[in-house]
Amino acid sequence: AEGYFVKPVDITILINRMMHILEKRRAPPQRVLIIDDDNDLAAHYQLVLAIAGMQAEVLQQPEAVITKIANFRPEIILLDLHMPNFTGLDLAGVIRQYDEWSGLPIVFLSSESDLDIQILAMGQGADDFLMKPISDAQLIGATRARIERARRLTSLITKDSLTGLLKHASIKEAADLETAQAQRNGKPVSIAMLDIDNFKLVNDTYGHTVGDNVIASLAMLLRQRLRHSDIIGRYGGEEFAAVLAECDQDDAYRLLDDIRHQFANIHFQARNQRFNCTVSIGLADSAHFPRLIGTELLAIADNALYQAKREGRNRTCI
Ligand code: GH3
Ligand code: MG
Ligand code: MG
Ligand code: MG
């Protein structure tokens, strides 16, 4: 493995570093949900967190907590203990029944000094118990640190280590979310499926590390050419999926077919031999299938991809 332009391991490190920088730069504001029956205090927390650059919302009716979490998608819940109808303990118990939110930090904010009750709160799935009154600096610091840690954990779970792209399950989830949102706003959305051509041959001829290098290169190209708002995933081994927001069929075709050309022009080198790879692409767009959810559009794009393969590969089909 001595003849590379860039060693695969170096490319992976480079991509991870680049991603880290990009992610920090484009990190959306941290979303905080405050649940407290004391309206003045809740409004104060909200203001303090907003000044610190976070997006904080107050939930007035605790019984609506489930819909609120589903819609707002908070990254932390700051929860009061004593409230008129529901206690914070009840609420934490309800939230912890949902597996998909098991990574969502719940932090109690209360003047309750009884250790037994604090321990009970932790038993309900709380992550921490902070005492009121809390200083503004402590509120900001504790909230920010917990969200940053939660984001790192989420990224480990949802992202593929070779390419830094979303994994299979996450790209499907993102496709459904993005498509639903686009349909609500009356905006177009396109979905692309890509599969490297005759990839088995690359592995068989040059080995798996060279193959990995090719996969990482296509991932990097997609990251460079697609917009920040687009969602890109590694769907399988040498298969990729992209969800292109506010992009109709014509725009998607032009962009993806250009990426296809660009990929075909990359020269890879291994064992003193130069070689090129090509990719086949299938597209589907929401305007032609207005009733379909994201994963169904993915399946349509996959059909188009197989058509591209059948017709001889290295092409984009709709
Ligand atoms: P086609 O043009 O029809 O797509 O042919 P293909 O050879 O690309 O398709 P096939 O699905 O038969 O082969 C894909 C190969 O990709 C098989 C598998 O060993 C290889 N592969 C899957 N994941 C990885 C990976 O992470 N790294 C490397 N190097 N190879 C992988
Ligand atoms: Mg209270
Ligand atoms: Mg394949
Ligand atoms: Mg393939």
Image (cartoon, rainbow, N blue to C red):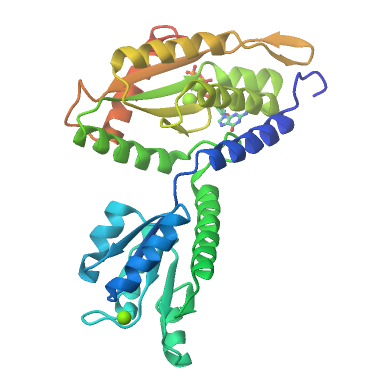
Q: Is residue 57 visible?
A: yes
Residue extending furthest toward the right = 2
x 46%, y 23%: residue: 226
Query: Is 117 located above or below residue 52 in the figure?
Result: below
Residue 132 lies, in percent from the top left, at 44, 80
Q: Nearer the viewer, residue 218 or 245?
A: 245
In percent of the image, x 60 and y 40: which residue is there? 20
Report the number of numbered marks: 0
Which image quarter holds the N terminus? top right
Q: Nearer the viewer, residue 306 or 184?
A: 184
Image x and y of residue 213, in percent: 66, 25
Quadrant assignment, res 47? bottom left
Q: Position of residue 234 (x, y in %)?
A: 49, 33
Q: Nearer the viewer, residue 144 or 217?
A: 144
In this rendered view, identify the residue nearer to me: 33 or 125: 33
The percent coordinates of residue 155 (x first, y second) are: 52, 48
